[in-house]
Image: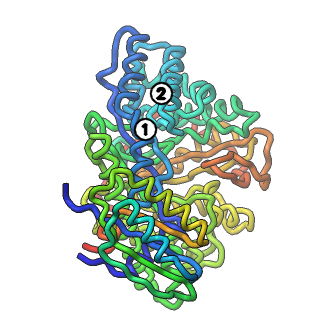
Amino acid sequence: MNIGLDEITETVRMVQMENLDIRTVTIGIDLKDCADADFSAMQTRVYDKIVSYAKNLKPYAEQVEKEYGVPIINKRIAVTPISELLGNATREQAIELAKTLDKAAADIGVDFIGGYSALVHKGVTKGDQVLLDSLAEALTVTDRVCASISVATTRTGINMDVVKQMGTIIKEASENTRDQDGIACAKLVVFSNPVEDNPFMAGAFHGTGEGDAVLNVGVSGPGVVLNALKKHPEADLGEVSQVIKKTVFKITRAGELVGRAVADQLDVPFGILDLSLAPTNALNDSVAEILEEIGVERVGTHGTIAALALMNDAVKKGGAMASSYVGGLSGAFIPVSEDNGMIQGVNDGSLTLPKLEAMTCVCSVGLDMIALSGEASAETLSGIIADEAAIGMINKKTTAVRVIPVPDKEEGTMVEFGGLLGRAPVMGVNPFSSEGFVKRGGRIPAPLQSLIN
Amino acid sequence: MENRRAVVSVLGKDQVGIIAKVTTVLSEKEINVLDINQTIVEDFFTMMMIVDVTQIEDLDSVRQTLNEIGEELGVKINLQLEEVFQAMHRI
């Protein structure tokens, strides 16, 4: 079939000028068969298995991106939640295993490896507890290891005992990396209703329903969507939805093609496409700017949630038509530090923590990459996590918390995390205590799923 | 091996000899041009070529040579496998 000249120019323009990219190709690797009573033997097997599957990830992905002319920004690895391997291991051994993961990632040349994780939304095993105990230090002594902890699901409720611990762990990780503005916390996500095939860090892990190895793809292109909308300043909101759907369809098709090509080269099955709009600090590659293009003067003002809901739904509809294998988180990411529009919203005072919480009700993920005042106590952090977990639990959706309390920094200060993690203005927290609530512990029961109002 | 086709796009300021230089590179690499389309869009010289790369193992070296020519001429030359365009614009 012939290709039209205008279609060629459109594609070339999307890539060259509007930052169309494949955000990440993430190989998920099962490590359960590496479990061994002899800990050092297990370390060797974990290292060997990761390297044997992923050693060619980077060169193959680079070859594919050149041939198809669509850049792939991140090449990453996700593994079985490590707590499942720990069993009777000690805290020190757990940290050693984290270092093994770090080394494997470094040797392969990928920037992040996810899966230093535990799913503890209902109960905590010995291995889970060892992982939790080691978490703050493991994130401090490694550069590339990412962790996620599931504390709640719609079917089990919220494990408040772990939520309580997470506040302390985040605080400790932040203190451990005090000289780098608490950067260890940027590698830790606390989840409600996590998905098992999410290619995006820091929340990626290779879930129990997955095969031995699989290649998942996260596509993105806020810049492309923004430019498409700019051509229709007079369109009504139904037409806006239509424009987003059509654009996301094209982005998704490109993503699936490239993802399948990389999976073929690696000789592993293709898994899912995560259709998300994920911002970067590049100019015009911002989710917030799309919302502003839809019509809110500055992200965070009245109408923002409605605009976000519209956009999120249109992204899913366009993507679902384009590919039969859609999974992951799929929607819009609203990290503050990685999105120039969000940063400006916070600086201008239009975007606040409560508004961000409300926005997480209608889009994927949750409170993401938010720098908090160093004065935020462990209990306050636990309170924030509990609120966000409750939103996810009640609304049967994924929510997450990735906040970074920055030691010694006060509200309004700008903090640079560097590279992919961007920069964020420090936000203040509610000065009243959550201690009484958090210290009760226990498990918040799973919600009734009928009588929905 | 089935047919492998690529799209070469050239964008930039119009000048003498763009087509000649690009096609010379392609012929030196023994790449056959299947279709060629050239127009001026908003003062920009825009050329699209569909080329046959079935026999070409090392696409990257072709790309690099084209990039060098592009820099010489001050135009942007892009080479992408055709599937991307088919995938994005056809259901």
Image coordinates of residue A235 in percent, x first then y, are 47, 89
In the image, is residue A398 above or below residue A206? Answer: below
Observer-nearest residue: A52 or B78?
A: B78
Name which residue lies at 54% across and 47% down.
A401
Chain assignment, label 1: A
| Residue B41 in view | yes
Residue ID for mark 1: A77
Kind of residue indicated by mark 2? Ala
Q: Quadrant of residue A440?
A: top right
In the picture, which quadrant includes the N terminus of chain A?
A: bottom left
Relative horizontal placement of residue A433, taking residue A130 as reference (left or right) = right
Secondary structure beneath dot 1 equals strand
Dot 1 and dot 2 residues touching (CB under 8 Å): yes
Label ID, residue B91: none
The residue pinned by badge 2 equals A104
N-terminal-most mark, 1 or 2: 1
Frontmost residue, B58 versus A152: B58
How many numbered callouts?
Answer: 2
Residue drawn at x 44%, y 46% is A192
Q: CA separation, marks 1 and 2?
A: 10 Å
How far across and down, in percent of the image, does residue A394 sit?
A: 41, 54
10 Å neighbourhood of mark 2: few (<14), some, or many (≥20)? many
Q: Residues within 10 Å of mark 1 (few under 14, many from 20)?
A: many
